[in-house]
Image (cartoon, rainbow, N blue to C red):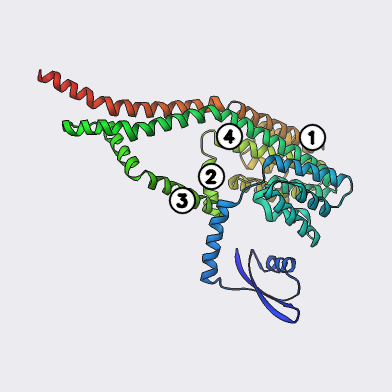
Amino acid sequence: MKYFIATILTRGKKEQIAMYAEDRKQAHDLTKLKYSGIILKVSEEQEPLDAQLKRLKNDLLSNVKKRKIKPDALIASIRQLAVMTNAGISIYDSLSEIAKSTTDEALKLVFSKLAEDINSGHSLSKSMNNFRFELGNLAIAMVQLGEKTGNLDDALYSLANMLEEIRSNVIKFKKAMAYPRNVMIAMAVAFTVLISYVVPNFKTMFEKLHAELPLPTLILLKLEYLFNNYGLYVVAVLFFSFIIFRYLVNNNKEIRYGWHKVLLRTYLIKNIIMFATLSRFTLVFSELIRAGIPIAEALDTAISMIDNLPLKNKLSSVRIAVEKGSSLHEGLEDTKLFENMIIQMISAGEESGTLDTMVGKVAEYYKMRFDAIIDGLSEAIEPIMLFVLASMVLLLALGIFLPMWDMGNAVMGKK
């Protein structure tokens, strides 16, 4: 974001207003939206040091404080908005009414701001872009679809159904993770207790006997020293490291790209991200094509809702290929993301003029694959869980009993 100074004339007086924007045009639009008066000049300036420090502080705090709207509240509000829009009530009145009636503070704030933007002449999708974190890319993409087709209420109904499906998958994911999570927490607590209270007793005994300690025991003693002397510092470092990492991921595109690339190479997570992304992409894309949106424009809208940057870059190449005259199936094939069966289905749809139907079937296929991963998540995690548990038990057992066996053998040898 760049630093701009806008000079406006209000009631015969000149005022200078500082703001951040991507470019001069956005800064001009923001000034026009937020302030009344005649805009005399908008110029890019060097950001003052105190402004830099204030921005850094606000960014750090915003990453801690900001939170998405509760899924249940968002789904209910989207359905309510769809019903009111279908009944002919204006978007401004609908948003204002939902903001007044909701008990979710985040939803109240977002919908109130959206209503203000609508009243200032902005489109709903453009206004929602300012709340991408709270609303999500999918909501913005579906609203763009509704605005382009003129069937905003249908798009909102579809959006609510998609959000409910996502919510259902999240619930299934949490249920699948409940058992392994509880086991790991219990083991972590037991390990911490043993390290903090049991190992120190053995440490005293080992020191009195001046025994030569094996590596597992040395590791346990080092962990005990770290836990009992620097435990709170370790927790504080981990907490602040998480906050800083989250800030960097949210505000630095290169770091975010690298993190997303790591996730795509991580066991199990890569499949969840891959099939969830391809399922949503093909679903939105099929809805856009069915509505008569040109392929290049439909690709642009569907790609805009993708969160993972490496996948987004690969799918963006499809849009470029289509604009240059390549067929859709050729562009998709070049990404190496789609199986040969999928490419053949897309090719058949292009030749027969049933591309929307074929893409819809592809979306169903990826949804089925994603559901299968979520349903088998507990079984997939078990090997990792067993490995971690076995490692912790082995470390404790060898660390405590190896020196005792050595001392026992030494005593027997003396006798």
Q: Are marks 3 and 4 in contact (CB under 8 Å)?
A: no
User: For the residue marked with disc 3, what is the amino acid?
Assistant: Phe
The image's mark for residue 357 is 1
- Which x, y percent locates residue 64? 55, 51
Give the SS element for disc 4: helix
Q: CA distance from mark 2 to mark 4?
A: 13 Å
Q: Are marks 1 and 3 in contact (CB under 8 Å)?
A: no
Residue marked by disc 4 = 271
| Front position in the image: 395 or 286 | 395
* Quadrant assignment, res 223: top left
Residue marked by disc 3 = 240
Give the SS element for disc 2: helix
Q: CA distance from mark 2 to mark 3?
A: 23 Å
Left or right position of 381 against 289: left
Give the SS element for disc 3: helix
Q: Is residue 46 above or below residue 64?
A: below
User: For the residue marked with disc 4, what is the amino acid?
Assistant: Asn
Q: Nearer the viewer, mark 2 or mark 3?
A: 3
Q: Residues within 10 Å of mark 1 (few under 14, many from 20)?
A: some
Q: Is residue 100 above or below residue 196?
A: below
User: For the residue marked with disc 1, what is the amino acid?
Assistant: Thr
Query: Can residue 246 be seen at all in this image of the molecule?
Result: yes
Q: CA distance from mark 1 to mark 2?
A: 32 Å
The image's mark for residue 387 is none
Sequence order check, earlier mark of 1 and 4: 4
